[in-house]
Image (cartoon, grey):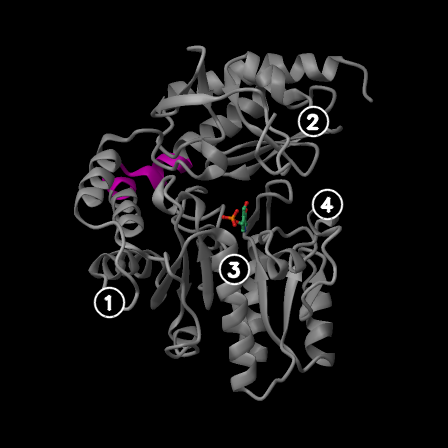
Amino acid sequence: MTHLLNTYGRLPISFTHGQGSWLWDKDGNKYLDALAGIAVCSVGHAHPRLVKAISDQASKLLHCSNYFEIPLQEAVASKLVEYSGLSAAFFCNSGLEANECAFKLARKYGHDKGIEVPNIIVMKHAFHGRSIATLSATGNPLVRSGFAPYTEGFIHVEEQNTEVIREIAKNNPNVVAVMFEPVQGEGGVIPIDLHVIQELRQICDENDWLLMVDEVQSGMGRTGKWFAHQWAEVKPDVMTLAKGLAGGVPVGAVVCSEKAKQIFKPGNHGTTFGGNPLAMRSALEVINIIEDEKLVENAEVVGKRLKKALSKSLNGFAGVRGIRGKGLMLGIVLDRDAHDILDSGLKAGLTFSVTAGNVIRLVPPLNLSEAEADEIVSRITPVIRAFLAQPKI
Ligand SMILES: Cc1ncc(COP(=O)(O)O)c(C=O)c1O
């Protein structure tokens, strides 16, 4: 009997501890972690520097309140500003909270311009979270269904189709922003074309809209750049972050351009826990580790090797449609629903997830070694081959 709400179809494994890219369950079995808590444990498990920073901060001050100055927030904000080229940050506790804040920024931006019912353009296969507003901005019917009425003010468009957005610009004066994930995670590890990202920047400039990127999953070095939109060499007005930002301590952030920084005034937005000293010390240490250990570069190099090796061992195999993604955010696309493969993955000592039904998602820690990348390939290849050898249901 469980006393938990029935929200997850959990796998029957319980982990007791981890080290680097490895996890152990309560029976002593060892797993190579190609999931990293869904792109969260960016510097691996039990990184000694992060453990030390968290313990030290816990012994000093966990929380005070945003009524007071929190110098650690300034320190994390200045790192995010430095790496993004943007201007200012706000801290919260999760991805959906960061996106809620972005939506509020866009709406307030509209109201300040005299637009009473501001609209935000979002993508059909986007995932922005599970609160009422963020699920309303999410395309996936599985996430949305059962939760109507939805929050109004979102226009869902097909990815990669900038023509449709140009048409909307001509006809709808209420649009204030476009929001998208540079690499869609829950949508099936789908990178948005770089020229589309560049064109979206251009459309936003022409129409005085905000360009908002949801980098909750793709940010913090995962794709081999600090932020995935940087592959397109554009700057957004608003960027949301969470997951890998503090390596497992729940932290979200909204980073704003000089223009978007002007929108909020005191009283417009806030949170009790967001940016507390424990959260900020963790985020700061994670960023310092990413810098010192060159993990952005590692994600690119090891990610390329992993993708190449996966392509070599799986491409052309009946049932494998292809390997896509960037850096250490990769998807193996199958021709069928793949949820039943998770168990055999665990039996082979490997954690990963399945997203969008038929995409095996690999988002290991950013400090994955080349040998560990090779080990992922040798563990996952027979699992996928055996799975595909079964009759297709
Ligand atoms: C791109 C993206 N945005 C937002 C979220 C929601 O983040 P959280 O689960 O921290 O609320 C997720 C979570 O998977 C995500 O991948």
Q: Does the magenta stretch include residue 93?
A: no
Q: Which mark is residue 338?
A: 2
Labels 1 and 2: the sequence-earlier one:
1
- Disc 3: CA contacts within 10 A as few (<14), some (14-19) or many (>=20): many
Q: Would residue 203 appear left or right of 157 to someone viewing this image?
A: left
Reading the image, the residue beneath label 4 is: 142
User: Type of residue at label 4?
Assistant: Leu
Q: Is residue 90 above or below residue 305?
A: below
Labels 3 and 2: the sequence-earlier one:
3
Measured in 3D between alpha carbons, the distance from the residue under mark 1 to the one under mark 2, in whole angstroms, is: 49 Å
User: Pointer 3 and pointer 1: residues touching (CB < 8 Å)?
Assistant: no
- Image coords of residue 30 (percent x, y): 43, 14
Mark 2 falls on what kind of element? loop
- Image coords of residue 349 (percent x, y): 50, 14
User: Type of residue at label 1?
Assistant: Phe
Quadrant, the N terminus: top right
Measured in 3D between alpha carbons, the distance from the residue under mark 3 to the one under mark 1, in whole angstroms, is: 24 Å
Dividing the picture into quarters, in which one does residue 158 lie? bottom right
Measured in 3D between alpha carbons, the distance from the residue under mark 2 to the one under mark 4, in whole angstroms, is: 16 Å
From the viewer's side, name the closer residue of 289 and 107: 107
Can the viewer see residue 58 in this picture? Answer: yes
Q: Would residue 362 appear left or right of 230 to someone viewing this image?
A: right
Q: Give the range drawn in magenta.
A: 289-300
Q: Nearer the viewer, mark 1 or mark 2?
A: 1
Labels 1 and 4: the sequence-earlier one:
1
Kindly identify the residue that appears in the image at 18 percent across and 42 percent down: 59
